[in-house]
Image (cartoon, helix red, strand yellow):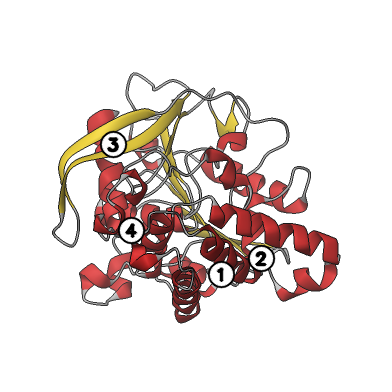
Amino acid sequence: MRVPAVIAAALTACLVLCGPGPAHSEARLFTILDFQFEDGSVLPDVHIAYETRGTLSPSHDNAILLIPGALGDRHVFDAAIGPGKTFDTDKYFVVTVDPIGGGESSSPAEGMGQDFPRYTIRDMMGALHALATRELGVNRLRALGGLSMGSFVALEWAIHHPENVDSLVLLAPSPKSDAGFRLTVDLVNTVIALDSEWQGGRYTRNPVEGLRHAGMLFYPWLVSAAYLDRIPPQQLAKEVEATARTFGEWDANSLVLRYAAYRAHDVSSPYEGDMAAALAQIAAPTLVLTSASDRLVGIEGARRIADAVKRARYAEIPTDVGHRAMRAAPDSPELSFIDRQIRQFLAAPSPSARKK
């Protein structure tokens, strides 16, 4: 079962600007032969789905690549892309992607199920780096942006390929998944496994009820206690059901492996646990944007990134809507804050432009 694009709006943190989203083209597929995963597994064919909007400059120096969150796909940024929008296609060549494990990219849902490699955030990064450099011919991105899990991927890219990034936009980031998040993922997996259809992941029918219940358990982490106190019961019921529906539309193995990668996130792992050494690799100007009330990813990790990265700009969205602030409604103060911060950041001359 492939994850439908429409689920992104139900749960995934994303930017939403006023007005309808731009028309988008059909996905293109980039194929990597004999892709080796971090655990040593090799797949003979890994494909990455992506779309582009805008025009790549003759010097290939205006590309922006955007990476969605864990439950999202390449469409979560759609409403923020277009002429005059946050990611202005009159200026930039904007690339949106489905990372390994979801959307129309290679995933357990395509038949391998539990036999699909246990991929990591760095595996996602490696495949997307190959897409940019080999498929698109872009050796230096004007900006690399990621949201939640996507910000983890972007962070790894900036650490391992600092020469390829002019600027970095991190939305709800952290350099490492904390204990609270890891426990939440463990509980999500337990709830899915309690569905008799799960069958240890060797199911013949997708365990939809287990997925739905896991979504209900997950919902409170997406918002703050203050938000729950102020919304009416009818709205709460609607939002919990939307989250349950979102989880239920995923293939169970794909969801479990996606959150396993999310859970294991730690940029210091290749540096023997030295977080300072890992973050010191980042050379690009970096916008660290987080929600002041985020209790899913938390703000401590974002602050740690801002403190360690030499040219970081840090901002907290003043809101009580938690992690979901990243998909603020049109005309909301959260939306205005996000849009303003990113526009101001991208308006600064890029390091490569200053060298010319």
* Residue positioned 73% across, 67% down in the render: 320
The amino acid at mark 2 is Gly
Circle 1: element type: loop
Mark number for residue 121? 4
Evaluate if marks 2 and 3 touch, with contact meaning CB atoms under 8 Å apart: no
Residue beneath disc 2? 322
Percent x, y for residue 328?
Answer: 69, 50
Evaluate if marks 4 and 2 touch, with contact meaning CB atoms under 8 Å apart: no
Mark number for residue 296? 1
Badge 2 crowding class, 10 Å Cα cut-off, few under 14, some 14 to 19, many 20 or more, is many
The amino acid at mark 3 is Leu
Evaluate if marks 1 and 4 touch, with contact meaning CB atoms under 8 Å apart: no
Residue beneath disc 3? 131
Whole-angstrom CA distance, mark 1 to mark 4, is: 18 Å
Whole-angstrom CA distance, mark 1 to mark 3, is: 30 Å
Evaluate if marks 2 and 1 touch, with contact meaning CB atoms under 8 Å apart: yes
Quarter holding the N terminus?
Answer: top left
Is residue 309 shown to the viewer in this render? no
The amino acid at mark 4 is Ile
Percent x, y for residue 257?
Answer: 36, 60
Q: Earlier in the sequence, mark 2 or mark 3?
A: 3
Residue toward you, 286 or 56: 56
* Residue positioned 21% across, 76% down in the render: 272
Circle 3: element type: helix
Q: Is residue 202 left or right of residue 228?
A: left
Evaluate if marks 4 and 3 touch, with contact meaning CB atoms under 8 Å apart: no
Circle 4: element type: helix
Whole-angstrom CA distance, mark 4 to mark 2, is: 23 Å
Residue toward you, 20 or 146: 20
Q: Earlier in the sequence, mark 1 or mark 4?
A: 4
